[in-house]
Amino acid sequence: QVHLVESGGGLVQAGGSLRLSCAASGSIFSIDAMGWYRQAPGKQRELVAAIFSGGSTNYADSEKGRFTISRDNAKNTVYLQMNSLKPEDTAVYYCNAVARLRFGALPLNWWGQGTQVTVSS
């Protein structure tokens, strides 16, 4: 099993910054990718940013230039630096890991419990 623990959410004024962290633990053989998704009330969960084992990244268009995803492979931890936050960024942010539990196994999706980010206008 893979356990993801998120931290860093909270309340911030528009224009402010927050840094989210997510640490993965458990019986992990390898992690192919880690990322952040978010879900606002009444909306579907959507990708915010992802980072792959080789270091390449992928961002949703609305976050490019404002958010930065990074990863510490040694700690199995992913970070999301969020700058210039807007009220529309308000959502529950979920950490995701695509991980293998043993050599040759198929990668599986794992999710954290989510952390609330609220941006006031």
Image (tube, rainbow, N blue to C red):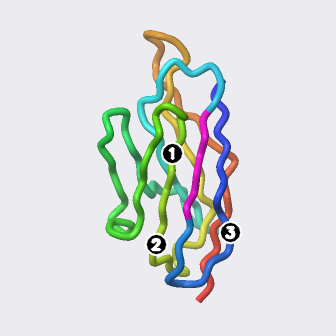
Height in image: 22 above or below 26?
A: below
Image-quadrant location for residue 9 = bottom right
- Residue 81: % across, % down: 48, 61
User: Residue 78 has which mark?
Assistant: 1
Secondary structure predominantly adopted by residues drawn in magenta: strand
User: Going by the picture, which residue comes out furthest to the front?
Assistant: 74
N-term-proximal mark, 2 vs 1: 1
Location of the C terminus by quadrant is: bottom right
Q: Which residue is mark 3?
A: 10
Height in image: 54 above or below 39?
A: above
> Is label 2 in a helix, a strand or a loop?
loop
Identify the residue at image location x=47%, y=22%. 30
- Residue 119: % across, % down: 60, 78
User: Going by the picture, which residue comes out furthest to the top?
Assistant: 103
Image-quadrant location for residue 101 = top right
- Residue 92: % across, % down: 63, 61
Indicate whether residue 22 is drawn in magenta. Answer: yes
Height in image: 96 above or below 114?
A: above
User: Residue 83 has which mark?
Assistant: 2
Q: CA distance from mark 2 to mark 1?
A: 16 Å
Mark 1, Cα crowd under 10 Å, few <14 / some 14-19 / many 20+, is many
Q: Do the CB atoms of the residues marked 2 and 1 lie less than 8 Å apart? A: no
> Is label 3 in a helix, a strand or a loop?
strand
Q: Amino acid at mark 2?
A: Asn
Magenta stretch, residue numbers: 19-24
- Looking at the rendered structure, the number of numbered marks drawn on it comes to 3
Height in image: 36 above or below 72?
A: below
Mark 2, Cα crowd under 10 Å, few <14 / some 14-19 / many 20+, is some
Indicate whether residue 102 is drawn in magenta. Answer: no
